[in-house]
Amino acid sequence: MRSAAVPSRTPYRRRSADAPRWLVWLLIGGLHAAALAALAVAGVQVPLPSAPQTLMVSFLSEPAPAVEPPRPPPPPPPKAEPPRMLATAKPAPAAMQALAPEQPPAVAEPAPPVPAEPGPAAPAPEPAVVPPNFAAAHLNNPGPQVPYQSRKLGEQGTVWLRVLVSPQGLPQEVQVERSSGYPRLDEAAVAVVRDRWRFVPARRGEEALAAWVRVPISFERNQH
């Protein structure tokens, strides 16, 4: 016969110093019962002991807690790198933006012209001056007397005189403007106009004025 296997004595840790002893014996009995049941199932006959064997149970003290070795200091935190500037591609501007058509500026309608207040009436223009006249038929102005010496020598020509005519039509001053080339003829022309001529005076409207007039006097060979 094979001797029954006696389970190995496994030391049990005492949970506490004051644990009840009956709990320990109950645990040992449970283990024996379980072992016998296992052998019966396997077909092994286990002779019953004539007398119960005394099991020696020793209570082991709890082992001292393991002292953990000192942990190495944590590595220094990594240095924070400054943020890198990343070039970002900007979208290209549109080639041309559609512009709204400009509205033509509103043209304000011109205000109606304010009628100008009538100012003082402009003075009427002065009438033109009519120069003196010496050729009027009713004047009967005679021709000059040709000097004897001039007639003998055949002197002839035309004298231009400037005559200042008074408002009464009389010659106030007679001047030789252009000579005939012969002093005797010039003197004869001045004498006849100064002494024997009359004029129609110059006029501005109804007013008679003193004015100058140019008078030509001609001398010819056949003139007496």
Image (cartoon, grey):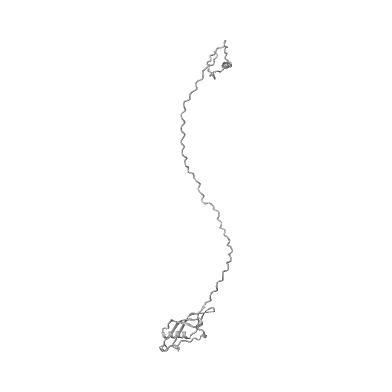
Q: Which residue lies furthest to the top in this view?
A: 50
Identify which residue, 90 or 195, lies in the foreground: 195
187 up-or-down from 61: above or below: below
Residue 62 vertical position relative to residue 201 in the rendered view, above or below: above
Q: Quadrant of residue 20?
A: top right
Q: Which residue lies furthest to the left in this view?
A: 153
Q: Position of residue 98 (x, y in %)?
A: 54, 52
Task: State the residue in front, 112 or 127.
Answer: 127
Q: Where is residue 110 in the image (x, y as percent from the top left)?
A: 57, 62
Quarter of the figure with the N terminus: top right
Q: Position of residue 109 (x, y in %)?
A: 58, 61
* Count of marks placed on residues: 0
Q: Where does residue 127 sit, x and y in percent of width and height?
A: 53, 76
Residue 152: image quadrant is bottom left
Quadrant of the rendering where the C terminus is positioned: bottom left
Query: Which residue occupies the foreground of this view, 35 or 63?
Result: 63
Q: In this view, does 112 lie above or below 172?
A: above
